C-alpha cells in the first residue's frame, strides 16, 4: 500500500536558524510531490511541487527552498527562518496513475 | 485555470441533522473535484472524488457529493451528523489528469450535542 511519512511532527526553532523537513513516500514510483503551508486559521498554500527528481517548481517566492534528491524523497529547507515561517507544513503526493493527492501527517513549526 | 469557493467558513449543525457544505468551482476545462477532511493537527484525508461518470459520488464516513455542471457546484452532504464529523472540510478542483490542483479556503464544521 502507499504511505507517506513526514518528520519531525513538531519543531520549535529560533529566528535565523536553518530548517530541514523531510517527506518520504512508499508504495509508488514517480509520484508528483507537494509542499503546502497552513497558517493558523487559514487555508492551504502551495509552496513547491515536483514532477520528478531534481524538478522543482516554486509557487510563492520566499526564503524557503525544496529539493528532491530521490524519486520518493522531498525536502523543505531554509537557511534562516523568519517568524512568519511558523505554521503547519504538509507534504502530499499524487501517485503516478491517479489524480488525487494524499497527505502526510504534517509538521507543526513554531519559530520563536 | 481553476478556482474554488466554499460558502461559509464555519457551519454548525446539531447531532443527527443534515450536513450540507457548499462548494462552487470555476474551470475552463472539465473539472476533477475532490473533498478532503482535516482533523485538528492532522493531515488531510480524501473523502471522495469525482472524475468522470456518475455525478453522485459516495465517499467514506457516509458522505456523498453531487457534481452539477449547470450550477458549477459540488456540495458535500451527510444525512445525519455525528460528533466525530467535527473537522475542517476542503473542496478542491483540478483539470483532467490532476493538473492545476486548487484547494478552497475550507469550512469548519461544528456538531452540537
Image (spheres, coloured by chain):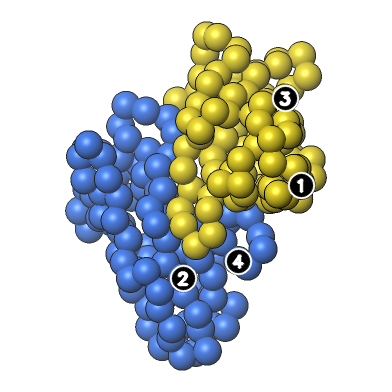
- Which chain is disc 3 placed on? B
Q: Quadrant of residue A105?
A: bottom left
Counting other residues with Cα less than 10 Å from the Cα at mark 4, is it few (<14), some (14-19), or many (20 or more)? some
Q: Quadrant of residue B4?
A: top right
Give the color of chain A as drawn: blue
**Is disc 1 in the same subunit as disc 2?**
no
| Residue A90 appears in the picture as rendered | no
Same chain for marks 4 and 1?
no
Q: Which residue occupies the foreground of this view, A73 or B35?
A: B35
Q: Quadrant of the N terminus of chain A?
A: top left
**Is A28 situated above or below A86?**
above
- Residue behind mark 2: A108
- Res. B39 in view: yes
Secondary structure beneath dot 2 equals strand
Q: Are marks 3 and 4 in contact (CB under 8 Å)?
A: no
**Residue in the image at 67% along x and 63% along y:** A41
Q: Which mark is residue A39?
A: 4
User: Residue A108: horizontal and vertical position, in percent?
Assistant: 46, 70
Is residue A44 shown left or right of residue B60? Answer: right
Residue drawn at point x = 54 percent, y = 28 percent? B62
Q: Which residue is mark 1?
A: B12
User: Which element type, helix, strand or loop, lies under badge 4?
Assistant: loop
Single out the mark in the foreground, 1 or 3. 1
* CB under 8 Å between discs 1 and 3: no
Q: Colour of chain B?
A: yellow
State which chain disc 4 sits on.
Answer: A
In three-dimensional space, the C-alpha distance between marks 1 and 2, rounded to whole angstroms, equals 27 Å
Share a chain, discs 2 and 3?
no
Q: Residues within 10 Å of mark 3 (few under 14, many from 20)?
A: many
Q: Residue B102: percent from the left, percent from the top?
A: 59, 41
Amino acid at each position: 500500500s502507499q504511505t507517506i511519512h513526514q518528520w519531525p511532527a513538531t519543531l520549535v526553532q529560533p529566528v535565523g536558524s536553518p530548517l530541514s523537513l523531510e517527506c518520504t513516500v512508499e508504495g509508488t514510483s514517480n509520484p508528483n510531490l507537494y509542499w503546502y503551508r497552513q497558517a493558523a486559521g487559514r487555508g492551504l498554500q502551495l509552496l513547491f511541487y515536483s514532477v520528478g527528481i531534481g524538478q522543482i517548481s516554486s509557487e510563492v517566492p520566499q526564503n524557503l527552498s525544496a529539493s528532491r534528491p530521490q524519486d520518493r524523497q522531498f525536502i523543505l529547507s531554509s537557511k534562516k527562518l523568519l517568524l512568519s515561517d511558523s505554521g503547519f507544513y504538509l507534504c502530499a503526493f499524487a501517485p503516478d496513475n491517479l489524480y488525487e493527492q494524499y497527505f502526510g501527517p504534517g509538521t507543526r513549526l513554531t519559530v520563536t | 485555470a481553476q478556482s474554488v469557493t466554499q460558502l461559509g467558513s464555519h457551519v454548525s449543525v446539531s447531532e443527527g441533522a443534515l450536513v450540507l457544505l457548499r462548494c462552487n468551482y470555476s474551470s475552463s476545462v472539465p473539472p476533477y473535484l475532490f473533498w478532503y477532511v482535516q482533523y485538528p493537527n492532522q493531515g488531510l484525508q480524501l473523502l471522495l472524488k469525482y472524475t468522470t461518470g456518475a455525478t453522485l459520488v459516495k465517499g467514506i464516513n457516509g458522505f456523498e457529493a453531487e457534481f452539477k455542471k449547470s450550477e458549477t457546484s459540488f456540495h458535500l452532504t451527510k444525512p445525519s451528523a455525528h460528533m466525530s464529523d467535527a473537522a475542517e472540510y476542503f473542496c478542491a478542483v483540478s483539470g483532467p489528469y490532476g493538473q492545476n490542483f486548487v484547494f478552497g479556503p475550507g469550512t469548519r464544521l461544528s456538531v452540537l450535542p
